[in-house]
Structures are given as C-alpha cells and as structure tokens.
Amino acid sequence: MFVPVWIIVANFVLIAVLLLWSLSRSSSGGDMLDRQRRDAPPAVADEHAVMTRPEVVDALQRGRKIEAIRHVRAATGLGLKAAKQLLERHAPR
C-alpha cells in the first residue's frame, strides 16, 4: 500500500504543532498564581491606623460590630474573614 509523502509530512507537521501547543499551555501554570497575587488586596501596612479611623471607632463604641467590619473592609480591601479577625485582634474587650 502506497501512502503519498505529502500526507506523511503533513501528519508529522500537525503532530509537531499540537505537541508544541500542548507544551506551551502546560508551562504557563504560573500565570494563574501571578494573577492571584496581582489581584489580591494589599496587605494592611498599619493596622493601628485602620482601627483608629473615626468611623471604625464610632461603630465599635455604638456596639455595631458588623458596621465596623464594613468600614475596615472598605479601608483595607480585606475579605470578610480577614477584616473580622483584624477587628477582633484590635477591638477593646
């Protein structure tokens, strides 16, 4: 059985292109980590400055913990859990 040479060459080229494409996709696994680091909220540089903001202090004095958490989140960009932990670390008992 005779197979034309151009069909064999075309198959090899197709296999090489697919192989290179799959290798380039698997080596870009760090892109997701880079995107997560870039999109993450900035670390709170001065927790004391956030906790002494007038709106946070006022909310805590009135016993409105949820409102204080909202203000901490707005000021820092932290998530709900992190803002609550920050508030609990620094709130007066």
Image (cartoon, grey):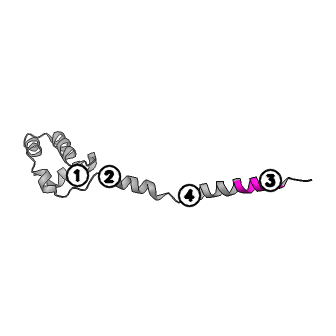
Q: Nearer the viewer, residue 49 or 29?
A: 29
Q: Amino acid at mark 3?
A: Trp
Q: Amino acid at mark 4?
A: Ser
Q: Name the residue: 55% across, 55% down.
A: 25
Of callouts 3 and 2, the N-terminal one: 3
Q: Say if mark 1 contacts mark 2, CB within 8 Å.
A: no
Residue 63 sits above or below residue 34 on the image:
above
Q: Say if mark 4 contacts mark 1, CB within 8 Å.
A: no
Q: Is residue 39 magenta?
A: no
The disc placed on residue 40 is 2
Of callouts 4 and 2, the N-terminal one: 4
Range covered by the magenta-colored residues: 5-13
From the top left corner, tell me how far across and down residue 53 is, in percent. Answer: 10, 48
Q: Name the residue: 40% across, 56% down.
A: 34
Residue under pointer 3: 6
- Asked if residue 90 lies left or right of residue 32, the reply is left
The disc placed on residue 24 is 4
